[in-house]
Amino acid sequence: MRVLGIETSCDETGVAVYDGDTGLLAHAVHSQVDLHATYGGVVPELASRDHVRRVLPLTEQVLAEAGLEREALDAVAYTRGPGLVGALLVGASVARSLAWARGLPALGVHHMEAHLLAPLLEDDPPAFPFVALLISGGHTLLVQVAGVGRYRALGESVDDAVGEAFDKTAKLLDLPYPGGPQLERLAAEGAPDRYRFPRPMTDRPGLDFSFSGLKTFTRNLVRDAGDEPGARADIARGFQDAVADTLAIKCRRALQHTGAQRLVVAGGVSANRALRRRIDAVAAELGATVHYPRPALCTDNGAMIAYCGYRRLAAGERGDIAFDVTARWPLETLREPG
Ligand code: KG4
Ligand code: ZN
C-alpha cells in the first residue's frame, strides 16, 4: 500500500510517499523561512499563498523521485489540524482533489499524532507501549501511548509551548527567525554556570509545564547585561540548560509513573542536541531507551503524514468524504483506527 502525505499546517510544505512494504520512497520539504524572516514570525496569509505555489510542484517532484505515476498511489493523507486554518485548507483541498480524481481514500490526519509516530520510521523503532514527549512550536505534551490512536495525556504546557519559548527567547537575544536552531548555535558558545535559570514547576508533583516565565527571566538578564561581551551566549546557554533539565525531569517522572521502558521524543525541538544529551542521560539512569526521529523528520515534514495515514489505513480506517480542517484538535480525542 502506497500513501502520499501532504503537510501544510504552518510554514513548511512537506510531501512524501510511504510504501507499506519498502518504507519511505521519497520526501521533500519546502521551508518558508526566507518568506517570513523579514516579519520575525509566520504571517498566516503569506504562508497559505506559498503553500498554493509549492504543493503541486513538490508533489510532482516527490512522485518523480519515487519513480511513481499517480496511478500507483493507494491513498492520500493530509494534515487536518491542528494548525493555521488557511494553510491547512491548501493541503486538504489538494489532497482531497487528488484522491477524488482517482477514487482513492483521503485521510485527514492529526499533526501531533504524526509527530508522535515519526520515530517509527527509523531503524529499530520503539514497540508499544511507550511514553511520548511532543515538543513543537505550538505544543508541549507528555502522552502515554498504548498503540495507534490510544493516547492518554499525562501533562502539557499551561502557557507557552517549548518551541514558542525558544523562538521568543531567541528574539530577545536579537537572533533571526526561526529562533530555535539559532539559539542552539549561540548556546554552544556560552558558559554553563554563569546564569542559573529556574526549572519551572519541577518543585511540585505533576507532569505539566510552564515556560513563559523563562522568557521574562531572559528579558531582565538581557536588560541588565547591556552590551557586555559574551553575555548573550551565556544567557542562551542558561535558558537551554533550564529547558533541557525541566523536560528531562518530567520525562523521568513520566517513565517512573507509568513504568514504561521506552521514551519517544518528537516535534521540532527534539532536533536540539543539548536536549537529547540531557534526556538520554536521564533515560539511561532508568534503563529506558529513547527514540527520536532523524533531524529532518523532527521538524514539519510530509513523511510523518504519509506514515500516519498508512498506519491508520493499515489498521482499517477508510477515510471519509467530510472536508474540514481544524485549528484546535486535542490529541486525546483520537480513537483507535478500524
Ligand atoms: O514541529 P515543528 O517544525 O512545527 C510545529 O509543529 O510547531 O516545530 C517548530 C519549532 C519551532 O519553535 C523551532 O524554533 C523549534 O521547533 N526548533 C528548535 C530546534 N529546531 C527547531 N528548537 C530548539 N532547538 C532546535 N535545534
Ligand atoms: Zn509540527
Image (cartoon, helix red, strand yellow):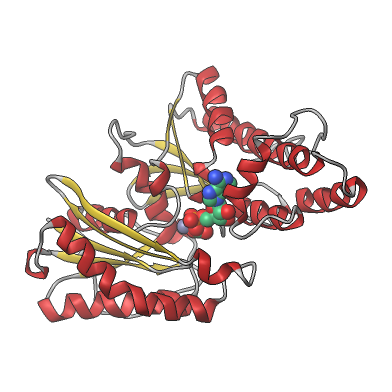
User: Is 8 on the left or on the right of 279, as rendered?
Assistant: left
Q: Nearer the viewer, residue 223 or 298?
A: 223
Kindly identify the residue that appears in the image at 60 percent across and 53 percent down.
Answer: 163
Res 97 visible? yes
Q: Nearer the viewer, residue 323 or 11?
A: 11
Tell me the residue at 67%/42% (across/down). Answer: 186
The quarter holding residue 308 reads: bottom left
Query: Furthest residue to the right?
Result: 224
- Above or below 190: residue 63: below
Q: Quadrant of the C terminus?
A: bottom left
Depth check: 10 or 37 in front?
37
In the picture, the quarter occupied by the N terminus is bottom left
Horizontal side of 289 relative to 212 (left or right) equals left
Quick check: 188 above or below 2? above
Question: Residue 259 placed where, x, y %?
Answer: 48, 27
User: x%, y% of residue 190?
Assistant: 72, 34
- Mark yes or no: residue 136 visible: no
Q: How many badges with numbers are in the image? A: 0
Query: Is residue 41 shown left or right of residue 114?
Result: right
> Measured along the vertical axis of the image, is residue 140 above or below residue 36?
above
- Give me the residue at 75% from left, 37% from top: 238
Q: Position of residue 65 (x, y in %)?
A: 18, 57
Relative horizontal placement of residue 7, taking residue 235 as reference (left or right): left
Residue 158 position in % (x across, y down): 68, 55
Q: Residue at x 37, y 36 (%)?
A: 129
